[in-house]
Amino acid sequence: MLSRLKEILSFAPKVINPASYRATMSSAGKQPEVATFASGCFWGVEHIFLKHFPPAQKKGILKTTVGYTGGNPLVKNPDYNSVCSGATDHAEAVKIEFDPGVVTYEQLVEFFYRTHDPTTENRQGRDSGTQYRSAIFTHSPEQRIAALKVTEAVQARHFTPKGKKVVTEITDAKEWWDAEDYHQLYLYKNPSGYQCPTHRLHW
């Protein structure tokens, strides 16, 4: 956490246009859906989703927002420092608005698993703490069923043969709080900024 705070204070961010990382629906007759994932430092989680599903290329992701969720319901408007202290139990997460006519929820869940280590509890790389846990926050019973199905398949195909177990939390979406503005699209504003080494394609 300390190294990340020093980095935030030491870099002059690049000026970007957030609209360049957003898109509009292209599927007639469909409504946008929301997927919410946590898998470590939210800078890298947001970055890798946008890298592989760039909105400008109409690959299904319409907009991303990083924020805090899944924590103590008595804590309102948590900030970065309090979340990183572990005192609020919130996870650093990414909320993804997507076009289900272009990319399915199941595809996003599988991609989520491809891009981090879901077998380490409360840790990704050097980042440790409950805020870095692996979690899927579902927005409907259908999403929960889909998340469980994909998790079972991923476990059998990629982790059981290695003797490892997926520890990802799958739970109903809870109250969401947007992170501070400087965290939004952080690695596009700071291209040489910190990125957890687990945020890559693992298969």
Image (tube, helix red, strand yellow):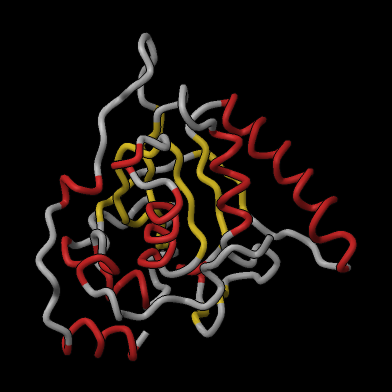
Q: Is residue 186 above or below residue 22?
A: below
Q: Is residue 82 above or below residue 12?
A: above
**Residue 97 falls in which quadrant of the image?**
top left
Question: Going by the picture, which residue comes out furthest to the front?
Answer: 57
**Measured from the top left, where is residue 111 in percent x and y?**
58, 49
**Measured from the top left, where is residue 13 in percent x and y?**
14, 75
**Measured from the top left, where is residue 189 in percent x and y?**
20, 68
177 or 134: nearer the eye?
A: 134
Q: Is residue 136 above or below residue 75?
A: above
Please name the residue shown 41% across and 76% down the image.
195
* For residue 116, side relative to residue 31 (left or right): right
**Residue 159 falls in which quadrant of the image?**
bottom right
Question: Going by the picture, which residue comes out furthest to the top?
Answer: 29
Please name the residue shown 56% across and 73% down the image.
198
Q: Quadrant of the N terminus?
A: bottom left
Q: Quadrant of the C terminus?
A: bottom right
Q: Please count the marks in the image.
A: 0
**Measured from the top left, where is residue 53 in percent x and y?**
42, 46
Q: Is residue 190 above or below residue 174?
A: below
* For residue 14, side relative to residue 24 (left or right): left
Q: Is residue 90 visible?
A: no
* For residue 103, side relative to residue 95 (left or right): right
Q: Is residue 168 visible?
A: yes
Please name the residue shown 78% across and 44% down the image.
152
* For residue 124, side relative to residue 45 (left or right): right
91 or 155: nearer the eye?
A: 155
